[in-house]
Amino acid sequence: MRIWIDDIRTPPEEDWTWVKTSQEALDLLAQVVISDVEEISFDHDLGLNVDGGDDTSRRVAYYLCEVDSFPKQVWVHSSNPVGRDYLIGMFDRYGNGAQYRAYVNPNPSGK
């Protein structure tokens, strides 16, 4: 399984499971064996939550660190430099590390 966390940008390939909110990501992770997840890729800013506040993927990072279980590969594709550095720092400190991977639109023509 490959998990793509992003509220706007589509996954780079069709075999990624796309979740658009931190809660959707947490719900999905609760249903799987996290260490069996091949890859997870994080956007930082996920729009507004149901209470009207900012939703970020920090909640997902906290959860993974709290349960001390991580996917085999952690990517961060966020274009927010502060959020990106925060997520990478969390996984570098508490997990197996993370790498930045710039987002490349899989369908640049919009078709």
Image (cartoon, rainbow, N blue to C red):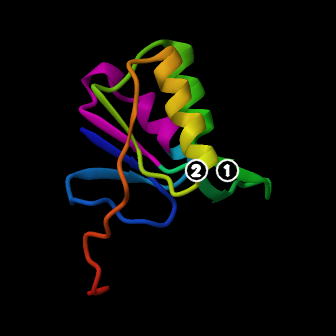
| Front one among 65 and 30 | 65
Q: Quadrant of the C terminus?
A: bottom left
Side of 15 relative to 58 (left or right): left
Could you say where residue 8 lies in the image, as x and y percent from the top left? 49, 66
Badge 1 marks a residue whose secondary structure is strand
Residue at image position (34%, 27%) is 32
Query: Residue at 72% of width from left, 55% of height from top?
Result: 50
In front: label 1 or label 2 = 2
Q: Nearer the viewer, residue 45 or 1?
A: 45
Q: Which residue is mark 1?
A: 55
- The label shown at residue 26 is none
Q: Which residues are magenta?
A: 25-42
Q: How far across and down, in percent of the image, does residue 63 sit? A: 56, 24
- In the picture of the structure, the residue carrying the numbered disc 2 is 81
Three-letter code for the amino acid on which mark 1 is drawn: Asp
Q: Please report the residue visible at 21 percent of the width from the left and 60 percent of the height from the top.
A: 14
In the image, residue 66 sits, relative to residue 20, either above or below, namely above
> The N terminus lies in which quarter of the figure?
top left
- Number of residues whose C-alpha sits closer than 10 Å to that of mark 1, classed few (under 14), some (14–19) or many (20 or more): many
Tell which residue pokes out farthest to the top in this image.
68
Q: Is residue 26 magenta?
A: yes
Q: Earlier in the sequence, mark 1 or mark 2?
A: 1
Q: Find residue 84 and report its horizontal and vertical position in percent.
A: 54, 44
Q: Quadrant of residue 76?
A: top left
Q: Identify which amino acid the numbered label 2 is placed on.
A: Pro
Image position of 96 with respect to 85: above or below: above
